[in-house]
Amino acid sequence: MTELDKKTAWQALTVLHPVFALTGVLQVVHGALLPSLAARFGFNDSHSGLLLTLYFIGTALGALLCRPNYGRSIVTGLAGVTCCCLGIAAGAQGVLFPLFFLMGLGWGVSCSSVSLFVGRNMPSRCAATLTFLNLSWSIGALVAPLLAAALLAYHDYRVAYASLAILSTLAAAICLRLPADRMEQGRSEARRPQNPQTWKLTASLPDLRLLATFGLLVFLETGIENIAVTWLATFSLRSSNFGFGSTGFGAAAAFSSLFWCGFLASRGVSSFLLLRVDPVQVLRSAVALALASALLIAVFPAGPTRGPALFFLGAALGPIFPLLLSLFFGQARRTSDTRWILAFSGVGGSVLPWVTGWLSTRSGSLRIGLVTVPVALLTMAFFVYSLSRKQPAPATAALR
């Protein structure tokens, strides 16, 4: 695969980093704005969960809709996000559900296209590039609840979505500077079967066992992240004495940012830690820490440990998705196979928040609904242990 030259790659990264930071904002901000939106329309937890479930279903489908030229796909996705944000700011209850689905579709196209653009055009430095791009995403995720808190202190969700529409428009405009994709080639000639027809068929099909293993892991990991995105602000509001109204909504959104502070810090630290430590060992330790933190939140939801537990839960989850993606890149036949992993990720992000809302409504307690987090982490721990016995190829090998 021919790479972008250094100058062109640098110009592309100056575009991709702010765009990826915006996708972090767009992924997280809806949960922080949810209490305001639910109060405006009288939603219960089931309605709120369905609203964001439709959004996350859209993100899953959007990953499958990515097509070369990936730069143009980013522009198309962000343009769709702009239209949907304007519709939410001006719309009534009846149009909220389809608009959230379409907004998720636009987000899925744009966010997934960023990762695929890097994998296609910068293969030899893909791992490092994705690590720092995920750091930019985390900065956006951290800013999102703080931005929501600032806006909710004086306005409601409508001003926030109008602001997001402006940011998405600007991001789409700068993405027009991205170069066209390079041609992708298959694996090395040494690995080709002698029969060209057999090679053509084998190269065109993804490894189903590999997809199933990593698909389940990213399904669970993204589901947990999106539970945090969807429900942390609401949980903070109900388990504290912030009170309802604009001040309480803003305080709850700000408190939930502790999760994203830990998330951002660990993304930065892990990029250096992985230079010295085995990635699978980091993965196993991160899952164990996340499980301990989730159990602490479940057992002591209003205690003094809640803040530190939120921080460490974010810190533990921070490196997991990039690690899983890097390990998959090391074994996938083609860069474009990653679309399926990103789609599994989006499905998990849609299902688990909905399950949390459904359990909360049926039991009358969001605390019971959040039991999905430790259950998902226990399942991850089992599969991560089996994964640790494998020796994947280097992360860049799958991108050549």
Image: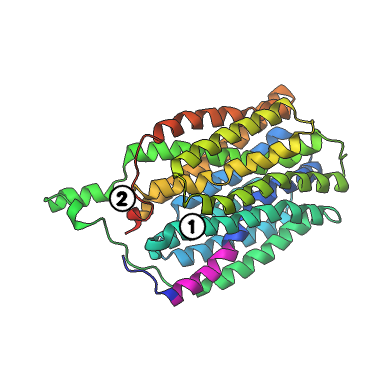
Check residue 16 for magenta coloring.
Answer: yes
Residue 212 left/right relative to 15 = left
Tell me the amino acid under the disc marked 2.
Answer: Arg
Residue 194 left/right relative to 31 = left
Seen in the picture, residue 322 relative to 378 is either above or below; the reply is below
Residue in the picture at 47% in, 28% down: 382
Q: Specify whether residue 221 is in view.
A: yes
Q: Are marks 1 and 2 in contact (CB under 8 Å)?
A: no
Classed neighbour count for the residue bearing mark 2: other residues with Cα under 10 Å, few (<14), some (14–19), many (≥20): many
Q: Rounded to the nearest whole Å, what is the CA distance between mark 1 and mark 2? A: 19 Å
Helix, strand or loop at mark 1: helix
Q: Specify whether residue 99 is in view.
A: no
Look at mark 1 in the image and give the residue it sits on: 130
Residue 395 left/right relative to 140 = left
Colour scheme in use = rainbow
Q: From which residue to which does the magenta span run?
A: 7-19
> Which numbered disc flags the more N-terminal residue, 1 or 2?
1
Residue 130 left/right relative to 80 = left
Residue 168 on image: x %, y %: 63, 64
Residue in the picture at 48% in, 67% down: 72
Check residue 212 for magenta coloring.
Answer: no
138 or 79: nearer the viewer:
138
Tell me the amino acid under the disc marked 1.
Answer: Leu
Q: Name the image quarter holding the C terminus.
A: bottom left
Residue 21 on image: x %, y %: 61, 60
Residue 155 on image: x %, y %: 84, 56
Residue in the picture at 51% in, 68% down: 13
Residue 331 on image: x %, y %: 34, 46
Q: Name the image quarter holding the N terminus.
A: bottom left
The secondary structure that dominates the magenta segment is: helix
Seen in the picture, residue 372 relative to 149 is either above or below; the reply is above
Look at mark 2 in the image and give the residue it sits on: 333
